[in-house]
Amino acid sequence: MIKSVLVINTQGKPRLTKFYDILTVEKQQELLRSVFRRADNVSNFVEAESIFGPDSRLVYKHYATLYFVIVFDSSENELAMLDLIQVFVETLDKCFRNVSELDMVFNYSKLHNILDGIIFGGQVMETSSAEIIRAVEEISKLEAASNSISLVPKTVSGWRSR
């Protein structure tokens, strides 16, 4: 089971945090520091037992100005989780045309829709970028349609015709 997904910038500020396990704020901050302090020439796989308990592992990948982190238990494969980070990044790149930190800040709901399309409740749901993008586009269309429906007339003449 996946316990957490994080995206952190190079200054150590979290841009996305999604926890599928209950964790105190102190432990969340310890997790952020454990990834941020690592050197570039060390392994991307880290034991996370001190934070999440026994059989917990952490894998991260550094892309441009962002660190993508997944915390998981022993039921998941480390290389599969590294590949899942790759799928997440590729999907973000396709949605935002070379994803940047600003895209993540200003498109927060779309970012969560993409993540929920890949991982839901700590379980991997989809690994195809094309399917995830198609689902996110459908959600965007539904949101646009619901925003265009007006329950209140926008003009005074609309009130008079009732």
Image (cartoon, rainbow, N blue to C red):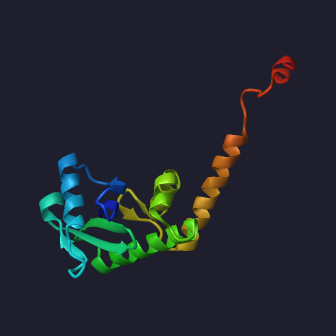
Image coordinates for residue 62, horizontal then vertical, percent: 34, 73
Q: Name the quadrant containing residue 6.
A: bottom left
Image coordinates for residue 50, horizontal then vertical, percent: 12, 61
On the question of residue 24 being in view, the answer is: no
Q: Is residue 152 left or right of residue 123?
A: right
- Image quadrant where one finds the C terminus: top right
Q: Is residue 30 left or right of residue 18?
A: left
Image coordinates for residue 14, horizontal then vertical, percent: 33, 56
Q: Is residue 142 left or right of residue 95?
A: right
> Residue lying furthest front in this view?
11
At horizontal 45% and vertical 74% (from top left) the residue drawn is: 87
- Image quadrant where one finds the N terminus: bottom left
At horizontal 59% and vertical 62% (from top left) the residue drawn is: 135
Give the mark count: 0
On the question of residue 111 being in view, the answer is: yes
At horizontal 18% and vertical 56% (from top left) the residue drawn is: 30
Q: Name the quadrant containing residue 123.
A: bottom left
Along the viewing direction, whichever of 105 and 1 lies nearer the viewer: 105
